Amino acid sequence: MDKKEVKNLLKNQRLETPSWGYADSGTRFYVFTQSSAARTLEEKLEDAAQVQKLTGVCPSVAIHIPWDKTDDWGRITRFAKDLGLSIGAANPNLFQEQEYMLGSVCNPDETIRKKAVDHMLECVEIMKITGSKDLSIWLADGTNYPGQDSFRARKRRMEDSFREVYEKLDQRMRMLFEYKFFEPYFYNTDLPDWGTAYLLSVAFGEKAAVLVDLGHHPLGTNIEQIVAYLLDEGKLGGFHFNNKKYADDDLVVGSVNPYELFLIYNELVSASLDADTRACADGVAYMIDQSHNIKNKIEATIQSVINIQEAYAKALLVDRNALASAQKEGRVLDAEECVKDAYNTDVRPLLREVREEMGLDPDPMSAFRRSAYSKKKAKEREKKKGTAKMSSGFQG
């Protein structure tokens, strides 16, 4: 792949930032507030617009309902458009209700299951107004003790509930199933792994796919292999980018294990060059899902975008012909070194060139700090009454 082609692909990279990433958030223990943090959906969109202005690759913002609920989605859609943004994936909240103590769509109580389904259908209606394409489902349902409930019964309730929502999707919409092997329940999780999410997506059809959250795996899981398999099956729908050290830490993507992020992008680039997997690779939604508890919200988001850009750039530099030859001939060391050569390449000069050609500052972090945007917003927002809508530590 020549330099011009690499540059074009980097210019056309698209990442979605989360509304909740701009607001105060925390763990189950405490929330450390920041004076510049966004308190309303409008403020979140204003902050997201700064990220887009400086990076040029983040034109959409994922929303979380009811954290972002508003009475006029048409107005919000126009507000976002005026900022150069669009509303991205809709994320229903199936975990912050007292009634969900025994589950939402898997709950033994039919009335509570209906409440969860109605909430997801509400999100579908919002998507119709905003033009959103993806309904991103993270299911917190599970049990804490053996014998608490029937695994099979919970599976059937989940399938029936999701099918009701799936059938209401427009043709342009998708339902993305995000899995998590534990937390907030600790005996079993009803949607625990990529296999279960894959089975659901196959059972429902073309408008269903799997969403991979990088923090939702046991330690040592080969996430790049999962990505490769889902691409080959045409069922990789999207990502929630973050990083972990131990559990679902929601740290800045690439901060703990940048090599893993690169290897994931290596599989994505490889699939985009294969006629059999290109369509699926081209349709993947790249969303950031992080909890910036102690970093400046916008700076952490910009840092995340830069880390992702670097991982993608390095993956684009892998010598595919040399790699394929080494793999075919069983030259194990040569194959590994081919991948490592790309990973060890300093792509920062290349990305600076790309940004300059896009009419952007070559160093978005420095540009943001020079703007003093956070200081200005801190003063403005401290004067306003009301408190931020804080997200839970159990963030999907």
Image (cartoon, helix red, strand yellow):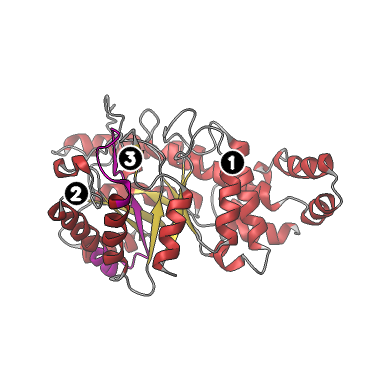
Query: What's the CA distance linking mark 3 and mark 1?
Result: 22 Å
Q: Tell me where residue 321 appears, x and y as whole percent.
A: 81, 57
Count residues near mark 1 (Cα–Cα under 10 Å), then give few for <14, some for 14-19, many for 20+.
Answer: few
Residue topped by disc 3: 395
Is residue 327 toward the left or the right of residue 249 in the image?
Answer: right
Nearer the viewer's eye, disc 3 or disc 1? 1
Residue 222's disc is: 1
Which contiguous range is marked in magenta?
124-152
- Residue 162 drawn above or below residue 66: below
Count residues near mark 3 (Cα–Cα under 10 Å), then give few for <14, some for 14-19, many for 20+.
Answer: many
Q: Could one spot residue 8 in this view of the protein?
A: yes
Give the image quarter of residue 3.
Answer: bottom right
Say which of 44 and 336 sits in front.
Answer: 336
- For badge 3, the amino acid type reads Gln
Q: Residue at horizontal 64%, vertical 52%?
A: 267
Is residue 284 toward the left or the right of residue 133 in the image?
Answer: right
Say which of 228 and 136 sits in front.
Answer: 228
Q: Residue at horizontal 45%, vertical 64%?
A: 202
